[in-house]
Amino acid sequence: MTHSPELSTAHWRSSSYSNTNGGECVQVSDDFPGLIPVRDSKNPTGPALVLRAAAWDAFISSIK
């Protein structure tokens, strides 16, 4: 079983494609080697997805 990392100390950055008004932002954290936590900036205390880096890379490649 894989456990999710503790995200309370994560440093989040917004997607370069997010608009400048603060809406519709996807944020990711680079603090966890091999894992990519993803969250909605409009709900920073809400749930986050934690993906393996390979899955995140495949997702990004598929939407380009």
Image: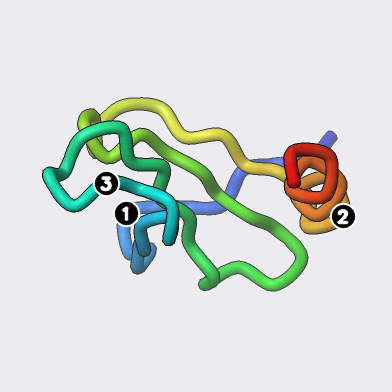
Question: Mark 2, residues whose alpha carbon is within 10 Å: few (<14), some, or many (≥20)?
Answer: few
Judged from the image, the secondary structure of the residue bearing numbered disc 1 is loop
Give the image quarter of residue 1.
Answer: top right
Give 16 or 43, whichever is nearer the viewer. Answer: 16
Q: Amino acid at mark 2?
A: Ala
Element class at badge 2: helix
Q: Nearer the viewer, residue 17 or 5?
A: 17
Question: Three-letter amino acid code at disc 1?
Answer: Ser
> Would residue 14 appear left or right of 23 to someone viewing this image?
right
Furthest residue to the left? 21
- The answer to the question of whether label 3 and label 1 lie on touching residues, with beta carbons closer than 8 A, is no
Label located before the other in sequence (3 or 1): 1
Of callouts 1 and 2, the N-terminal one: 1
Q: Give me the residue at 70% from left, 58% from top.
A: 35
Residue ID for mark 2? 54
Earlier along the polypeptide chain: callout 3 or callout 2? 3
Disc number lying in front (1 or 2): 2
Q: Position of 37 compared to 24: left or right? A: right
Mark 3–mark 1 distance (CA, rounded to whole Å): 25 Å
Q: Which quarter of the figure has residue 42? A: top left
Disc 3 or disc 1, which is closer to the eye?
A: 3
Amino acid type, residue under disc 3 in the picture: Asn
Task: From the image, state whether disc 3 or disc 2 is nearer to you.
Answer: 3
- Local SS, label 3: loop
Cα distance in 3D space between marks 1 and 2 = 23 Å
Q: Nearer the viewer, residue 18 or 37?
A: 18
Residue 47 horizontal/vertical position (percent): 40, 27
Residue at horizontal 74 percent and vertical 48 percent from the top: 60
Q: Where does residue 10 sit, x and y in percent of width and height?
A: 38, 63
Residue 19: assigned label: 3
Read off the residue under disc 1: 8
